[in-house]
Image: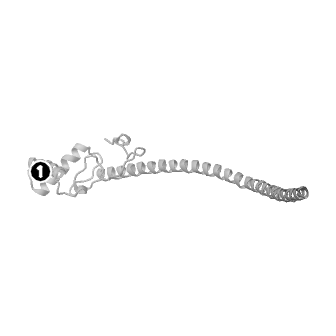
Amino acid sequence: MLDVQQKAFQACLQSFVEANNKRVDELVREQVREITDLRMSLQYPQREIDEMKMTIHSQSDRLSNTTRDVEQVTCAQREMEDGVDYVKNQMRRNNLRIDGVAEITARNWADTEAVVRKSFTTALKLPEAQANATVFALSMRTERDPTLPADQRPSSSGSRRTRTETASCKPFARRNRVASS
């Protein structure tokens, strides 16, 4: 009788293990199918992500090229502005009109300077030697005077305009200026 019970217990246990194995095998197959489906569904977004990365990289390159072009154009614009300012200032210096001095186109610079000096010395009622010394002394004093605001001091560079220089963009240089004399 023990033999029969043992065989019945083994048969019951085996049927339980087989049923459990079938259920586990079915769950594993179902999980494998779901994982395969997820893998397949992730391939499409991964392709899109790779395409987006390529697009972002190309857009980044275009942006850096455009930024470089904008910087070059900005530098060229600054140079042109400085050049225009220089030409305007040169025209202003060359087109001074002084009361009491007739405008004669045939007169050279030396003659014009002498006529202007004479006009100033007569208007200020100063001897000529004192007028020259006074002009020189005033210009030297204003250059060194720390009480004068910086924009009122004479500039030795010829331009009071200041701009921050960068390594790639330098202000209008003297080498670009055309000598007018």
Residue 4 percent coordinates (x, y):
91, 57
| Mark 1, residue position | 134
- Tell which of 22 and 137 is nearer to you: 22
Q: In which quadrant of the rendered view does residue 147 lie?
A: bottom left
- Tell which of 147 and 51 is nearer to you: 51
Q: Residue at x 32, y 52 (%)?
A: 162
Mark 1 closeness class: few <14, some 14–19, many ≥20 residues within 10 Å: few
Residue 98 percent coordinates (x, y):
23, 56
Q: Quadrant of the N terminus?
A: bottom right
What secondary structure is marked by label 1? helix
- 167 versus 34 height, above or below: above
Residue 55 percent coordinates (x, y):
64, 51
Residue 42 percent coordinates (x, y):
73, 55
Lateral position of residue 172 relative to residue 29, left or right: left
- 173 versus 34 height, above or below: above
Q: Residue at x 46, y 51 (%)?
A: 74
